[in-house]
Image (cartoon, helix red, strand yellow):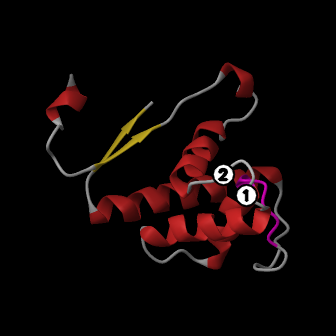
């Protein structure tokens, strides 16, 4: 198996899992992964979650405010106090969110190899 061949190699391993309970959310695997990686706790207030999200995004390098706002929106976090709001239709928001996610992966991969499994 390919994964076993990576044992002992320095890399980041990302697993994305779908759920039959979230079939209507194409972003569910990304949301779940971000929640785990940021260390969200069930009882964290939104402000704490936003702090944790920003910390996570900053690990891979500079993250523009627009990207942080997109990720916060994806996570259902209020951003009015930190970021300007943007008026985008649903399709454009999805496109920008995917672009931001890919950019984050690219920035992470520049720091060390990334193995993605689903």
Q: Main secondary structure of the magenta part?
A: loop
Q: Position of residue 77 (x, y in %)?
A: 78, 60
Quarter containing the N terminus: top left
Q: Name the residue located 59 percent from the left edge and 37 percent from the top edge.
A: 29
* SS category of the residue bearing label 2: loop
Q: How many marks?
A: 2
- The image position of residue 22, as x and y in percent, is 72, 28
Residue 62 tag number: none
Q: Please check the rendered image and state whether residue 75 is part of the magenta-colored stretch, yes or no.
A: yes
Point 55% across, 47% down: residue: 36
Q: Which residue is mark 2?
A: 41
Task: Report x, y in % for residue 42.
Answer: 71, 47
**CA gap, disc 1 and disc 2:** 5 Å
Please check the rendered image and state whether residue 18 is part of the magenta-colored stretch, yes or no: no
Left or right: 104 in relation to 9 = right
Give me the residue at 79% from left, 71% from top: 79
Which image quadrant: the C terminus? top left
Q: Are marks 1 and 2 in contact (CB under 8 Å)?
A: yes
Q: Is residue 42 above or below residue 65?
A: above
Residues drawn in magenta: 74-79
Residue that protrudes farthest toward the front in the picture = 43
Residue 73 image-quadrant placement: bottom right
> Which disc, if any, is residue 44?
1
- As drawn, 103 above or below 65: above
Mark 2, other Cα within 10 Å: few <14 / some 14–19 / many ≥20? few
Res 30 quadrant in image: top right
Task: Indicate the secondary structure of the residue bearing disc 1.
Answer: loop
Q: Is residue 98 above or below residue 77?
A: above
């Amino acid at each position: 198996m390919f994964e076993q061949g990576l044992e002992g190699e320095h890399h980041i391993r990302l697993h994305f899992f779908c759920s039959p309970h979230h079939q209507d959310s194409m972003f569910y695997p990304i949301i779940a992964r971000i929640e785990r990686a940021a260390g969200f706790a069930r009882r964290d207030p939104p402000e704490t979650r936003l702090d944790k999200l920003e910390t996570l995004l900053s690990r891979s390098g500079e993250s523009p405010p627009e990207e942080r706002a997109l990720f916060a929106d994806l996570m259902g976090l209020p951003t009015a106090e930190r970021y300007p709001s943007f008026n985008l239709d649903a399709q454009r928001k999805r496109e920008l969110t995917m672009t931001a996610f890919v950019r984050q992966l690219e920035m992470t991969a520049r720091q060390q190899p990334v193995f993605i499994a689903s």
